[in-house]
Amino acid sequence: MSAKRPDDIAPKLLAWYDANARVLPWRAPPGANATDPYRVWLSEVMLQQTTVAAVRPRFEAWVARWPDFAALAAADEADVMSAWAGLGYYARARNLVACARVVASEHGGRFPEDEAALRRMPGLGDYTAAAISAIAFGRRAVVVDANVKRVVARLFADDGGQARALADAITPDARAGDFAQAMMDLGSGICTSRAPKCLLCPLRDHCAGYASGDPEAYPPRKAKAAKPVRHGTIFWLEAGPCVLLVRRPAKGLLGGMRALPTGPWVAEPPGLAEAPADAAWGWHPETITHVFTHFRLELRLASATAAAQEAGGEWWPVDALDSAGLPTVFAKAADAMRRVRCG
DNA sequence: TATTCGTGGTA
DNA sequence: TTACCAAGAAT
């Protein structure tokens, strides 16, 4: 089966977009004919596997602090990592700095407009390179994200394997950037993963999935892997008004982020293994549970008071922990500690 | 190609 | 409460 009159899809979708586009801070305001590549790039990276609702306030704060490539290229990487705290997938933040520095040092402060050149920049994969090329520079590019995959799978009643070719077949030469954003708005609000609103869809008459009577069957869902549970210990070591923080290794989970010290994350609770100091550790009554993409982590909290700030790391004022840029799992632990400390 | 990389919203 | 999953990239 295939979509009916595929040449009519792009004009219809663009007309729908002109009337229904979401207003988002990284989109050019109505009437403006220029889109800032820096803002397009930043938003696309922030939006990788991250919801619009989560990104919106972070995007605004980010562009206020680092308004362009030059500012970000000159930033302290530690400050950038802290500013990203809570957004997840922290390699994105490190790649943002790397990319801004490449733009500054090798491209004269401007993004290359060519999709293939964009694809070579740190943190830009097939999707993001195509999106920037189309949205920021008006070039025709085939932009394929999870929304586009789902929409074309339904339009053509495809199993998902031909997504790029099908997207290519309906992408127009003009307004490719608007077309990409229209596909994403459609996927986000109408052609949703569950319970699609077909009666509101401007492409319903073209949709083989709708005609089949079960559009939700496209694309087929993948089997999910079970999440193992790992156990660990978070160490809360105080000295005076401060608590001990460490910097996690650059690679791997929460790479490069400031953190509370932890021992190993293993199948059985590791107790006081790899404690940062020899001290009179006591156990907090609560257990911290945090779910990552591929495992669930159960953490016990051990606390102690040190006579002096001797253990290696950074001693951070407890009252200012909110400014430390801790990933969510450690922010949870800090909240639990402060709840008990304050009664 | 399959895994590893976070987090918060939603049903 | 659990499970799903959202504008993916790197290895």
Image (cartoon, coloured by chain):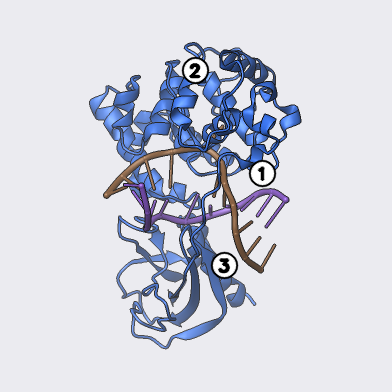
Chain colours: A blue, B purple, C brown
The amino acid on which the numbered mark 2 sits, given as a three-letter code, is Ala
Q: Is residue A75 visible?
A: no
Which residue was labeled with disc 3?
Answer: A335
Is B8 in front, or is A231? A231
The disc, 1 or 3, on the residue closer to the chain's N-terminal end is 1
Task: Name which residue lies at 69% across and 23% down.
Answer: A20
Q: Please name the residue shown 60% across and 15% down the image.
A: A5
Q: Residue A7 location, x and y as percent?
A: 56, 13
Which amino acid is tagged 3?
Asp
Q: Is residue A289 left or right of residue A116?
A: right
Q: Quadrant of the N terminus of chain A?
A: top right
Q: Any mark on residue A194, and which?
A: 1
Which residue is label 2 attached to?
A: A176
Residue at 65%, 15% (x, y): give it: A15
Residue projecting furthest to the front = A1
Element class at badge 2:
helix
